[in-house]
Amino acid sequence: MHPFTYVKATSAAEAVRAITAAGSGARFLAGGTTLYDLMKLNVETPSVVVDINSLAELSNFDTSGSEELIFGALCRMSDVAADARLMRDYPALSESLLAAASQQLRNMASLGGNLLQRTRCAYFRGGEPFACNKRKPGSGCSAREGINRGHALLGASEDCMAVYPGDWATALAVFDAMVDVLGPKGQRTIPLQQLHREPGAAANIETNLDYNELILRIRAPVTPLGRASTYFKIRDRESFAFALASAAVALQMDGDIVRDVRIAIGGVATRPWRARGAEQALLGRPLTERTARASGDAALQGAPATVDNRFRIELCARTVAETLMIAKRRALAR
Ligand SMILES: Cc1cc2nc3c(=O)[nH]c(=O)nc-3n(C[C@H](O)[C@H](O)[C@H](O)COP(=O)(O)OP(=O)(O)OC[C@H]3O[C@@H](n4cnc5c(N)ncnc54)[C@H](O)[C@@H]3O)c2cc1C
């Protein structure tokens, strides 16, 4: 057990002040389902933990606005997943939360913490003696020559091929969500698609957030595409498992023709991945089993694979195709 100091913040400003004073070895604590997990594995060893759970200002969400959906960073996954308006008008968002973890975890886990969850790569979580540039910069990547069946097809580098595992961020990617953060210099907004970084040569730097920036809320513009949206996740077992491949789709049709479509894929990339090539492949065309599959192929086009993870190129292409057909049924039913 590594000793650490526990600080309970009572406002967002106080939380930012406390973590800034503590330095880059400190961490915010929300539900703790990632942070405590990694502390028990000795992968995270914070000197100070700043508990943000008392920040009422971060704990509400509003899906009734005419311009945007607003989700406080401390909202619990289960509360948001069960929101009737979200289930009706933005099913992809609700489904992505429900497809994650277990009911007990969703009751505890926050939306902000969910965005910042860390990879499930066994070499990252396993600690010594495994090499991991993310955990220990410069040590290498055991996954490269190791068991990499679940590792990234997209966005990987020589230094790191760990997958970004979250479901919610993948669904948010199709809705052009934005993330409001508070730091010592004030508030700023980061497009969700720019929150996470590809590993490149600095696998330990996973986001474009500073250690002392607090996620306040996530916002997504209101769009008619939400109604015919869906999140579909393929995993090794039916529930309580991370994605081998997943897709989020939001769709608008004119008869049989795709008027607008947004596609993101999960479980296969080092960050939440908007599949713009797959969208282009469909725009203005009829949506059929064949064109849906071509769109799935476009999502993975040129993805370099290893012997172990190659099967997930086909799996993900099929997942995209299936997700599109589910969204089409929803679009036609409205
Ligand atoms: C067994 C298990 C299975 C899981 N399965 C899935 C799954 O299938 N799909 C899926 O998507 N997720 C899954 N998860 C991940 C889970 O959803 C996340 O652990 C959870 O959402 C993290 O939220 P939290 O509030 O507990 O975060 P915490 O653990 O409290 O924090 C996580 C990280 O975010 C930082 N942080 C938290 N809140 C803020 C904030 N407001 N601003 C800045 N930094 C912040 C913390 O400092 C920490 O680094 C699983 C987790 C477990 C343990």
Image (cartoon, rainbow, N blue to C red):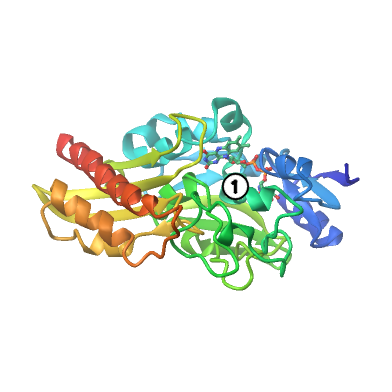
Q: Is residue 334 above or below residue 128?
A: above
Instruction: Please rate how many residues cluster around mark 1, counting C-alpha atoms within 10 Å: few if below 14, some from 14 to 19, many from 20.
Output: some
Give the residue number, with chain letter if any, for mark 1.
120
Picture quadrant where residue 258 is located? bottom left
Ligand 1 in which quarter? top right
Query: Residue 20: x percent and y percent?
Result: 80, 61
Residue at 86% x, 43% y is 6
Q: Is residue 135 visible?
A: yes
Query: Residue 254: x percent and y percent?
Result: 11, 50
Query: Residue 297: x percent and y percent?
Result: 26, 58
In the shown orientation, is residue 20 left or right of residue 237?
A: right
Q: Is residue 67 visible?
A: no
In the shown orientation, is residue 259 left or right of residue 26?
A: left
Query: Residue 189: x percent and y percent?
Result: 55, 63
Q: Is residue 294 above or below residue 34?
A: below
Query: Amino acid under label 1?
Result: Arg
Quarter of the figure with the N terminus = top right
Comparing 110 with 131, the one in front is 131
Comparing 83 with 37, the one in front is 37
| Residue farthest toward the bottom in the current orientation of the protein | 201
